[in-house]
Amino acid sequence: MDTAVLEQMLDETFDHAVVHHGYTDYMRDYEVIIYATADPRTGVAPAYLRYLFQYCVEARCETSVPAEIWRVSLDDRLLDHETADPDLGGYVWGVRCHCMYPGAELLPESEATRRWSKALGIDFHEVRIETNAHNLTLLFSDLQVSELPVGYAPSS
């Protein structure tokens, strides 16, 4: 996959929301479902987009929420946005999405990308996706982006 095209595809995720991420049900590819919106004045309708990272040989997910916020965010009442008690002062997990800020970035070639490229005979890339709750690092070969139909269920 051409790195300039890949970078452009990743740039288009800036400031949208991740609503789901994980390996597909067949466990080879990693999907990131994004809710993409634009200023209503543009006339561009919101859409759910599936970023399918193909041949994903490594996926790391780590929290971006600091420990001091975690400490006050353990209460199960923070799991539901509708009933979350603002007096608890913790992170409300139940928002059902994470803001992609600063977003997704293609990382420089690494030992891991070189090793996998050599072993499989295809190019590999590494991307870092940062949100306000999780940071993802994915090692993959190709990226396909598609708009999702109404009623799509992850990994279907």
Image (cartoon, rainbow, N blue to C red):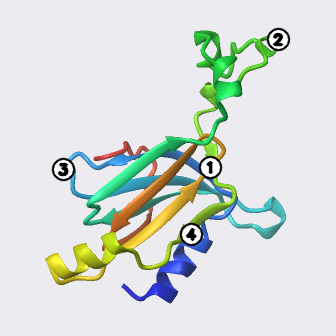
Q: Residue furthest front?
A: 111
Q: Is residue 122 above or below residue 73?
A: below
- In three-dimensional space, the C-alpha distance between marks 4 and 3, rounded to whole angstroms, equals 26 Å
- N-terminal of the pair, mark 1 or mark 2, is 2
Say which of marks 3 and 1 sits in front.
Answer: 1
Which is in the foreground here, disc 4 or disc 2? 4
Q: Are marks 4 and 2 in contact (CB under 8 Å)?
A: no
Q: Which numbered circle lies on residue 87?
A: 2
State how many labels appear. Answer: 4
Q: Depth-wise, is mark 4 or mark 3 nearer the camera?
A: 4
Of the image marks 4 and 2, the number of the one nearer the N terminus: 2
Q: Is residue 65 left or right of residue 22?
A: right
114 or 127: nearer the eye?
A: 114
- Disc 3 target residue: 26
For label 1, the residue is 131
Q: Secondary structure at mark 3?
A: loop
Q: Amino acid at mark 2?
A: Asp
Disc assigned to residue 105: 4
Which amino acid type corresponds to the residue marked 3 in the rendered image?
Tyr
At 36% from the left and 53% from the top, the residue drawn is 59
- Amino acid type for the residue under numbered disc 1: Thr
* Number of residues whose C-alpha sits closer than 10 Å to that of mark 4, classed few (under 14), some (14–19) or many (20 or more): many
Quadrant of residue 141 within the rendered picture:
bottom left
How far apart marks 4 and 2 lie (CA) works out to: 36 Å
Query: Residue, x 15% and y 77% (percent of image)?
Result: 120
